[in-house]
Amino acid sequence: MARRAQNNPRQKRSKTCGCAACVEAYPVEKYGERKKRRDCLGSWQARYRDADGAQKSKNFPKKSEADAFLDSIRTSVRQGTYLDPKRGDILVTDWWELWWPAHKKGRTTTKNRKLASWKHIEAKWGRRKLNSLTHMELQAWVTAEVKGHATQKKVLELLNMMLRDAVRDQRVPFNPGEHVQVTASAPARHPDDLKPPTREQYALVRKNLPEYYQPFAVFLEETGMRWGEATALRRCHVDLDNDIVKVREVVIDDEGRLMRQAAPKTAAGFRVVPLTPVAVEAVRTMIEKWDPADTESPIESGMHPEELIFRSPRSGDKRKVRNEAGELVEVTIEGVLNRNNFKRVWLPAIKEAGIARLVKNAETGRNEWWPRVHDYRHALATRLHAQGVSEKDVQLVLGQKRGGRVTWLYTHGSDEALSTVLAAMQGQKARHLQAVS
C-alpha cells in the first residue's frame, strides 16, 4: 500500500504574508515589505485522488477544514459515493445547455411548454451554480414569485427533471427541488362558467355566424372533436358511405406557425367518430365547396391544404407580400383554419346570440369570453351522459385515455338534472342512474 504523504494538507505561500517562508517564496525586493506575523496567512491545500485515481486538490483557509475535507473525501471514495465537486460547480444556464439537447425531442407542444417554463427558471437561477441551490430558496421562490397553480406545477416539473438528471450525472449529491411544493390553489370556477350552452343557445350562435362557418359549427357540435382534430380532417379520412370519420392527425400551433402532427393528444385520440345526418350534411357542404383531394400525403411533407375538409374562406387566394430582399411577390394563401382568426367571427356571434359573458380567469387574471369553441366538446359529453350512454362509450368517442376523466372533466349538470333531483326531494319517483366504473 502506498505511503500517505506527510505534508497533506500543506500550507501554500502568500504574497501578503511576511513570515520567513512566505518572504523566501516571494522576496521583498520583488513583492515589497510585508508585516511579519506569528501565524502564516497562506491557505491550506488538501490533495487527494478521485475514484479514477486522478490527482485533485482544494484550498481552505484553515488546516482543520482541510483535514475534515480529506477525511470525508477518502471515506466517500472508499464507499463509492464520491462526487467531483467541480462537476456541480456549473451555472444552471450551462447545465441547461447540456441537458436540453438530450430532451428536446418529442411533441412540439411539449417542447414549447418546457421552453416557456425554462424562461421562469433562467430569469431567477440562470447565473447560480448548480450545487448552490437549496430547498428553502427554491420553495420561497415558487411561493413568492411564480404566479398561478398551473405555472408553478409546470415550472417545478421541469426543474425537477433537470435536477434529477444532475444527480444521475453525479453533479450534485441530491435533488434540492424534490420536495418543493405547489402553493398556489387551483382556480375554482362557478358552475355557470363551466356548464356548456344548450342546444337552443348553440342554434342562436350558429345563426349569427357567417354562412360559410355554419357547417363547421355544426360539425363541432355533433362530433365533439378537438379544434386541432377537426381542422386537420382530410378527405381520405372521411367515409360517407358508413357515416364515420377517422381521427388520424392534428393541426398544432407552434408559436404562431401551423403544422401537422401525427399523433393526437393521447393514443386514445386515434379513433373512429360516428356522424349524425346533420354532421354528414355539413361535411358534404364543404366537399362541394372545395372538392378536396382524396390523396393521403405524408405528414412530414407539409400542410397540403388541398386535402382539407374545413378551411379558411380565403384558401387559395393570391396576395402580395415582401420577400427577404424587400420585393413584392405573389403567394397563395394556404387557408388552414386558425383559432385566433376564427375568434373574429365567434365573439360577435355569441354576443349577438345574447349568451356571451366575460369571465375573469382567477389564475392568470386575464378576461376570457364564455362560451369557448372548446365547449362544444363539453356539450356533447353532457348530452350523451344525460341520454344514458355508458361512460366507456363516451370515452371512446371523445378520445379520452381514462373513462373516469370524462365524468369529472366534460360532463356538467343540466336543467333536467335539477328537475330530477327536485322531484326526488318531493317524494316523487326519480329515474335511476347506473354508475359505470
Image (cartoon, grey):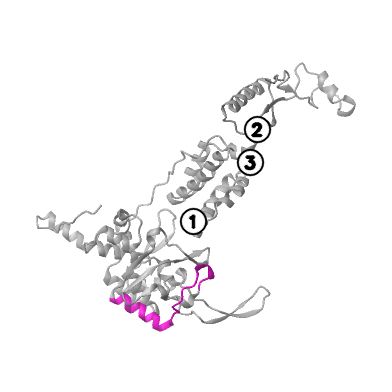
Label 1 CA crowd tier, 10 Å (few <14, some 14–19, many 20+): few
- Image point (56%, 30%), residue name: 81
Amino acid found under the numbered disc labelled 2? Asp
Residue matched to label 2: 52
According to the image, label 3 marks what residue?
90
Report the residue at 30% width, 55% height from top. Answer: 403
- Is residue 192 in view? no
> Mark 1 falls on what kind of element?
helix
**Real-space Cα separation, disc 2 to disc 3, in angstroms:** 21 Å
Alpha carbon separation for disc pair 3 and 1:
26 Å
Q: Position of residue 219 (x, y in %)?
A: 35, 73
For label 2, the crowd category at 10 Å Cα-Cα, with few meaning under 14, some 14 to 19 and many 20 or more, is few
Residue 298 belongs to magenta span: yes
Q: Please report whichever mark, 3 or 1, sits nearer to the chain's N-terminal start.
A: 3
Whole-percent x and y of residue 141? 51, 42
Q: Which of these two is toward me, 169 or 185?
A: 169
Viewer-nearest residue: 355 or 325: 325
**Dominant SS in magenta:** helix
**Height in image: 420 above or below 186?**
below
Which region of the structure is painted magenta? Answer: 277-303
Which residue does the numbered mark 1 point to in the structure image?
Answer: 110
Q: Amino acid at mark 1?
A: Thr
In terms of secondary structure, where does tag 2 sit? loop
Task: Give the label, 2 or 3, closer to the camera.
Answer: 2
Query: Does residue 366 appear to the left or right of 8 in the view shown?
Result: left
Residue at 48% x, 78% y: name it.
306
Q: Earlier in the sequence, mark 2 or mark 3?
A: 2
- Residue 150 seen anywhere in this rendered image of the structure: yes
Residue type at tag 3: Ile
